[in-house]
Amino acid sequence: MHATAVVLGDRCVLVAGSSGSGKTALALALVEKFRGAGRFARLVSDDQVFLSVHYGRLLCHAPQAISGLAEVRGVGPVPVEHEAAAAVDLLVRLVPATEVERLPGQDSETILGCMINRLLLAEREISMATPAILARLGITLFA
């Protein structure tokens, strides 16, 4: 799947979108925010994710050729700390802003027979996406 995956604490977010939609930038911003709060966060895979099902859960991992790498626009692939695999808890689809509802309800999508919670967010809007993702996961970084 054309997507980027990150582990945030004990949750995994799969960020999907077209090329240039901001998948990597959003994923790295989420990791930085978590680490800044002293919480565990790591990249699973950047730009391409292999998916499988294990005991009814959707799992993701990186293709071997790009494992441990993240593409930084204008620089190229750089090494990053990563997790080998994770079970997906939330699918974030980055779409044109005109396709995003201001007050969306709960939404889901079925991938490989697994129903995954889904959140549609505007492309390249990292500052708006980050709190929406944390809220959907029920995560509070600062009490």
Image: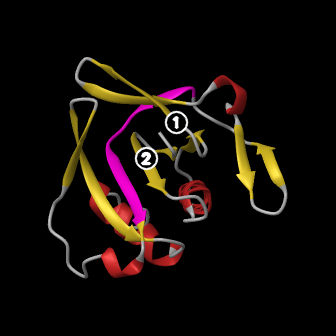
- When asked about the image quadrant of residue 119, the answer is bottom left
10 Å crowding of disc 2: few (<14), some (14-19), many (20+) = many
Q: Disc number at residue 49?
A: 1
Q: Residue at x 82, y 63 (%)?
A: 74
Q: As displayed, is residue 127 above or below residue 140?
A: below
For the residue pair 31 and 57, the one nearer the viewer reads as 57
Q: Position of residue 56 (x, y in %)?
A: 22, 23
For the residue labelled by badge 1, is the local secondary structure a helix, a strand or a loop? loop
**Residue type at mark 2?**
Leu
Would residue 89 be counted in the magenta stretch? Answer: yes
Q: Position of residue 25 (x, y in %)?
A: 62, 62
From where the camera sits, is residue 57 visible? yes
* Horizontal arrangement in the rendering, residue 70 relative to residue 46 (left or right): right
For the residue labelled by badge 2, is the local secondary structure a helix, a strand or a loop? strand
For the residue pair 44 and 140, the one nearer the viewer reads as 44
From where the camera sits, is residue 138 visible? no
Q: Are marks 1 and 2 in contact (CB under 8 Å)?
A: yes
Range covered by the magenta-colored residues? 84-94
Q: Position of residue 143 (x, y in %)?
A: 37, 67
Residue beneath label 2, please?
A: 14
Q: As displayed, is residue 60 above or below residue 131?
A: above
